[in-house]
Each structure stands twice: as C-alpha cells, then as structure tokens.
Amino acid sequence: VSDDFNKCVDFNITIDEFEHNWAGLMMKYEAMTHTHFEKLYEYRSTWVPCYFKHRFFPFLQSTQRSEGFNAVLKRYV
C-alpha cells in the first residue's frame, strides 16, 4: 500500500497523471469511502508535488524545513 501511495504522489509529472493514478489507487484498495483519503484528496494542491511544480522557491531547501521542525520539537520535549 505504502509503495503504491508514494508512487502515485511522487512520480507524476502532470496533474492529469496524478488524478488518473489516484483514482486507480482508490479503486485498487477500496479506499474511496475512507474519510482520511477524502480529506487528503481535498487538500491535494498543498501536498502533491505536481500541483506546485510551476512555482519557484529558490531559498528553501528540504533540510531547512526539517531543521526548523526539529527546533520547534526540541523546545516542547
């Protein structure tokens, strides 16, 4: 399940590809009625890479995001 989900999210170049693969994934695992997946799909434009590939974020690196989160987490732990 996890491998199929990751392939669907990370390896689609276009939005149409994602939409097609997402529908296939939901049918394959019969997840269409699960509220969790409905919410994920509703907010897909904020977390699926093919929706924001056309935007340029020159000063943000993936390590900066994780280091920022780690700093917040350390304050509360």
Image (tube, rainbow, N blue to C red):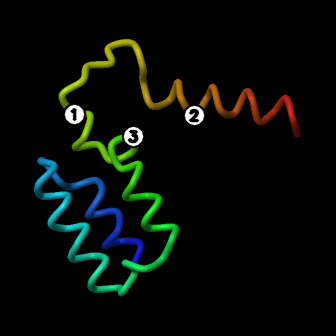
Name, please, the residue furthest toward the top. Answer: 59
Which quadrant holds the N terminus? bottom left
Give the labeled residue for mark 1. 53
**Residue 41 position by quadrant:** bottom left
The quadrant of the picture occupied by the C terminus is: top right
Q: Position of residue 61 (x, y in %)?
A: 42, 24
**Which amino acid is tagged 3?**
Thr
Query: Helix or strand or loop: what does disc 1 sit on?
Result: loop
Q: Position of residue 74 (x, y in %)?
A: 81, 33
Give the residue number, with chain letter if any, for mark 3. 46
Q: Secondary structure at mark 2?
A: helix
| 45 relative to 4, above or below | above
Q: Residue at x 18, y 28 (%)?
A: 54
75 w.r.t. 51: above or below: above
Q: Residues within 10 Å of mark 3 (few under 14, many from 20)?
A: few
Label 2: which residue? 66
Amino acid type of the residue tagged 2 in the rendering:
Ser
CA gap, disc 1 to disc 2? Answer: 20 Å
Type of amino acid at the residue the image marks with label 1: Lys
